[in-house]
Image: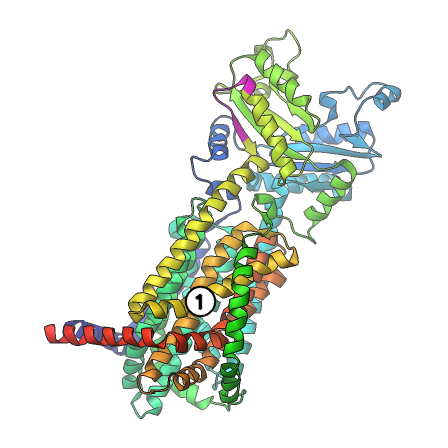
Amino acid sequence: MGNKKNAVDRLIDIVVNQRKRIEKFFLVGVIFSAVLSLLVETNYDLTEYLPDWAPVEQGIQVMEEHFGYPGSARLMIDDVTVYQAKDYKKQIEKIDGVDTVSWMDSTVSIYESEAFLAEQDIEDYYKDGHAVMDILFDEGDSSLRTYDAIDSIRQLLGEKGHLSGPALDNKTLEDSLSGEMPKIMAFAVVAILLILTLTTTSWFEPFLFLTTMGIAIVLNMGSNLIFGSISFLSASVSAVLQLAVAMDYSIFLLHTFIKKKEEGLGVEEAMKEALHIAVPSILASGVTTIIGFVALALMKFTIGKDMGFVLAKGIIWSILTVLLLMPALILRFHKLIEKTQHKPFFPSTGKFSQLLFKIRHVVAVIALIILIPCYTAQNMNDFLYGTASMGSGEGTKSYEDNLLTNEIFGESNMAVVIVPNKSIVTEGKLADKLEELPFVKSVTSLAGTLPPGIPEDFLPENLTSQLHEGGYARLVVIVKSDSESDYAYSCMEQIKEITREYYPDESYYVGTTPATQDMEQIITDDYGIVNGISILGVALVILVSFSSVSAVIAVMIPIELAIFINMALPYLYGQQMVFLGYLMVSSMQLGATVDYSILMTNTYVSVRAEEPDKKKAALKAMSQCIMSILTSGTVLAVAGYGVYHLSSVAAIATLGQLIGRGGIFGMTLVLTLLPWLLCVFDKGIMNGQRKKAARKRKEKKGV
């Protein structure tokens, strides 16, 4: 044990005595990381996170290998005649990046008389001077070439054109995030700076905290290069979350240093003592947060691994920055901290603590009453699972264009069916059977394109290769439905059922609806695993820290109840939620707010060692922790709600709302319910402390 203590002492001596070298090391690291962060790519395609065994992923692999993985869009053109629409179609087909444009001219000759056209059923393609077309691009929905093609189509059509669909969702998502994230980050910095200014007693302290966290954020962003690319969700919220969640560590270290200096120690000795006290608490808090994030990596839908590792790595960088660099910064600027001291903006929290302590029994009764209803309600939410829920939000042009197109022509959804190219006759029968379905608008296939009696070899290869390649045939099916609903799923299942009648051994299905079906199944299965592992992991850390099952129960109850309430509210509001955000926030809220519980329980244990009255000990612990918890909880809430109000992307806005609201509930329940729980479980908690102390004495004797 002595050797271990000496090793810690030597490490602390290095941190304090070699601080100038450490500053230089971090300066080089920040510059290097800032450059590397520019090389990290952002991925906007959620299908890339599906496991290899998912049916739609297998279909994507076959299609990429033989046909490429085309993006798609829907286009409506205003104020055109049939002939003008045909001309626009020809021009769009010539745009680089456009593969095919499907319109009614593939089934109806538009050069017939107007009387003939009037008799045809063309309302799915042309109505009241509006024409609607379906576009397939050469490359994927997130390809720069596809984005350039979209820009070219918009330039060609101007205000007459209305584009929507998966490619537009991805482009809008990317454009929105590139514009919104700097605003969100700027808001978070300004808001957190204001909160810290109000809750600290030095004008310089907030800048020191933000500088430390800013360095940790840049280091995390640069080191993301080890992943090659990160998801748009990670890119959007990781920096704000890291700033909000890890701020506690720097606040705790500085305030511990100031306290030790006020006791009469020199600045270097005060820092060494502060590090001795801070290291165990910061590591314990950090490990619980990391476990909550790493649990996401166990998701079979691997965007969880993406977010989990990025966020966990951010916490690791924050801990390293606070424990290695911040001591150097504090020692460099400690005189400036003293010179910029000011009177507290808030009065003493003693009376407020007493008020909260008095209502603990009322809060406990309310908690018992709402526990089961909230747990039940959170499992009854209405969810969105697919990529459509991630893209164009209200207020964006693609969202408005989609509404306008749907209003005139109804909803449209593209699916690709891939089957073995064994018989052109069988393929033709399948295409005809699918076109008979009432919800199918059109089916594009080589069997339907090839004139009767004409061999496939007679057609140019650049045409046939789009639909026949490498032993496979591709059929593009346009369905008159949205992409994510029970009706859309029913349509897709009927398409699959008919296809299997003709191709029972092998067939693949690609598109937003089949991808969403797979995502729903996989993400739903992930929920129980991720939640269970994160709760178990955090509980284990608490058990090791306090050596008491009673402490685990007391610490976890307020946080889990806060999660239940947070997740139950959308059901009570009738709000449809993005399931991916719901799944992730459960782990994030647990990891981010359990620190409040641990801080108060640690403080209670310290006070209780000298205070025989458990109620007085609980009140003192609350009085000592209340400002730290209020500061941390408010920072998390403001950061979360900032994301919610400033992002037009539904998935990210929902994530922000849940994080912000979760921070408020976590903070509130820790300050009102936990003091009661500490008193209720006092005997078990203190027995655990005595056992822990006894083990340490034995270890010392053994050494």
Left or right of residue 410: residue 462: left
Figure check: 198 above or below 368 = below
| Name of the residue lying farthest toward the bottom | 264
- Closest to the observer, 254 or 282: 282
- The quarter of the picture where the N terminus appears is bottom left
Q: Within 10 Å of the Cα at label 1, are there few (<14), some (14-19), or many (20+) other Cα atoms?
A: some
- The quarter of the picture where the C terminus appears is bottom left
- The residue carrying mark 1 is 557
The quadrant where residue 84 appears: top right
- Closest to the observer, 43 or 530: 530
Q: Amino acid at mark 1?
A: Ile
Residue 574 magenta: no
Residue 112 seen in the current view: yes
- Which range of residues does the magenta coloring cover? 501-509
Left or right of residue 287: residue 479: right
Residue 222 seen in the current view: no
Q: Position of residue 306 (x, y in %)?
A: 43, 50
Figure coloring: rainbow
Q: Name which residue lies at 45% across and 58% down.
A: 587
Q: Position of residue 446 (x, y in %)?
A: 61, 18
Q: Position of residue 485 (x, y in %)?
A: 63, 40
The quadrant where residue 339 appears: bottom left
- Closest to the observer, 331 or 509: 509
Q: Name which residue lies at 51% across and 29% down.
A: 63
